[in-house]
Image (cartoon, rainbow, N blue to C red):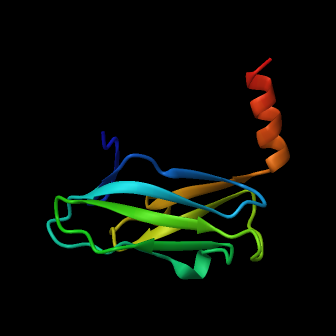
Amino acid sequence: MWPIQMGGIRLRNTEVTFTSGKKAVETVSFINLTGKTLKLECEAMFLPQCLTFSSEPVANGAEGVMTITYDPSQPALREKTSIILKGLGLPPSKSSITITVISSDLQTKNKNQQYE
């Protein structure tokens, strides 16, 4: 149920996908096992303008949610980027959520291939 360990939290997944040109909100669920209340934050310096990140404080042992919003009206990001979480005592390579933005043309092509 919580297959990914990241410091004192366990997550269901560490990847989020958005479709270019479509405003969207995605969530990543986690459970706090730090022994204290935790409010996840990200390294804002590396967060592209088209993404926002939020999370509410989560008590030890409780489930929390990271909310990631994609706004295509803001300056774009590369096809792939990472949101680096702060406060987990891990290097960035081990405390990141991977964000992928796929072309709406590619998404349509993939859906059409499923039906062939």
Q: Where's residue 35, x and y in %?
A: 14, 66
Q: Where's residue 44, x and y in %?
A: 54, 80
Res 114 → quadrant:
top right
Image quadrant for the N terminus?
A: top left
The residue shown at (17%, 65%) is 60
Image quadrant for the C terminus?
A: top right
The residue shown at (25%, 69%) is 58
Compared across the picture, whether 63 is left or right of 20 comes to left
Residue 26 vs residue 95, the one in the foreground: 26
Numbered disc total: 0
The relative height of residue 1 versus residue 89 in the rendered view (above or below) is above
Residue 19 vs residue 4, the one in the foreground: 19
Res 112 → quadrant:
top right
Residue 46 vs residue 55, the one in the foreground: 55
Q: Where's residue 19, x and y in %?
A: 72, 53
The residue shown at (58%, 67%) is 69
The relative height of residue 108 versus residue 100 in the rendered view (above or below) is above
The relative height of residue 51 versus residue 104 in the rendered view (above or below) is below
The residue shown at (16%, 71%) is 36
Q: Where's residue 101, x and y in %?
A: 71, 55
